[in-house]
Amino acid sequence: MTAPLLPAQLSIVVPTFNESQNVGLLVDLVDKALPGIAWELVFVDDNSPDGTSDTARALALTNPRVRVLQRVGRRGLSSACVEGILATSAPYVAIMDADLQHDETILKAMFERISEGDVDLVVGSRYVEGGGMGEWSESRIKMSQFATKLALRLTQTPISDPMSGFMMMRRDAFMRSLPHLSTVGFKILLDIAASAPTPLRVAEVPYTFRTRQFGESKLDSLVLWEYVQLLLDKMVGHLVPVRFLSFAMVGGLGVFVHFAVLTALFKGFDQTFSAAQTAATLVAITSNFLLNNMFTYRDQRLKGWALLRGWISFNLVCAFGAAANVGVADWLFSHKSYWALSALAGITVSVVWNYVMSAFFTWKKKG
Ligand code: GDD
Ligand code: MN
């Protein structure tokens, strides 16, 4: 360990989830890569079951440049990065992964470039001359390139690798994006670029993506859904919250589930209409609950007993929502409103009710 130069000129924010085998190695490598630069490093750990927070705190006890921000009951790569940046003060901030896939030896070049003062953001890029994908599968490369094309349309900022999770930026530039950030999902760079009030001035430094040695990737198929949410939020988020869109979409799906169960029981199994309707309602509410828990509230997913409690509260919320639906529709219809419009108004009221109340009772944020 070289003697720390503080206060820090460069704050490096490293999101972690189950990276306890990597954090020590990363600090050593960064230390070698940034001689003579006053850097600090903050791990933002979402209470990893493998004890990454404790491992990182042990490092912090021997190295004053290292700190830990431990978040409990939360998940999310982008939000972790944002909170990490906000917990630091240096004029320049970097974001990099903990798993050693990002080549720390380019940090120095990134720092020199951003210090020149004519750019807001330096991106570690796999797509400019000299960079590379390392050992990525064909299908993941294809997917990444497709997402990249979509991203370019959105940000209007010429970044060859907008999916990169490796970057360095001026704090003042970040602060200008901050009020407009979506902070859903994995794509923090894209979020920052698309949220900037005026296009960012960007430079890129090539690197080759390394292969992970320890631990595993957290990128799963739901990351694609989060990406869609991010794009939606950037396009229509100023009009309606994306969470509400997702909630309403799940509700729409629930109508199909309802009719499928109803038809099967009533027509297929000769049940009475009222029995079939009751069963269909229960199944639809339950499937809506589980889908919302998986997609709409992926960042605060309920598990175990909390899942059961959430299911009960969701049933109660929906029961009141249904009563409001019928009440409003009835009232409108009896006051000479067209029947289909009355029904639509009833549905709208119940969707909004269910959304607001379930946000409050079923998926309420802790603290
Ligand atoms: N705090 C926190 N919370 N950290 C997380 C979470 C989370 O929910 N999910 C992942 N991380 C951390 C991981 O521990 C790792 O340090 C980093 O975020 C990247 O996660 P990986 O699971 O290794 O992602 P990847 O390698 O598949 O994808 C990376 O590379 C892509 C290409 O550059 C990420 O950086 C992507 O954002 C990037 O697009
Ligand atoms: Mn990785």
Image (cartoon, rainbow, N blue to C red):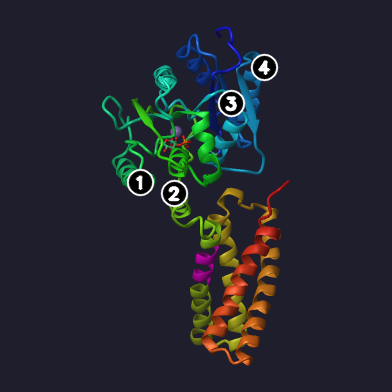
Q: Which quadrant holds residue 209?
A: top left
Which-is-in-front pick, marks 4 and 2? 2
Compute the Cα span from label 1 to label 4. 41 Å
Please report contact status of discs 1 and 3: CB closer than 8 Å, yes or no: no
Q: Secondary structure at mark 3?
A: strand
Residue type marked 2:
Tyr
Residue 333 position, x and y percent, is 60, 89
Point out the residue furthest to the right here: 367
Up the image or down, 15 lies above or below 182; here it is above
Q: Which residue is mark 3?
A: 42
- N-terminal of the two: label 4 or label 2? 4
Q: Indicate yes or no whether the magenta region holds residue 251.
A: yes
As shown in the figure, which amino acid type bears the numbered disc 1? Answer: Ala
The earlier-in-sequence mark between 3 and 4 is 3
Q: Earlier in the sequence, mark 2 or mark 3?
A: 3
Magenta-tinted stretch? 247-254
Whether the magenta-drawn stretch holds residue 125 is answered as no
Of callouts 2 and 1, the N-terminal one: 1
The residue indicated by pointer 2 is: 227
The residue that mark 1 highlights is: 147
Q: Which mark is residue 61?
A: 4
CA distance for labels 4 and 2:
37 Å
Mark 4: which secondary structure? helix
Q: Quadrant of ligand 2?
A: top left
Mark whose residue sits in front, 3 or 4: 3
Residue at figure coordinates x 69%, y 59% from the top left = 360
Eye-nearest disc, 1 or 4:
1
Mark 2 nearby-residue class (10 Å; few <14, some 14–19, many ≥20): some
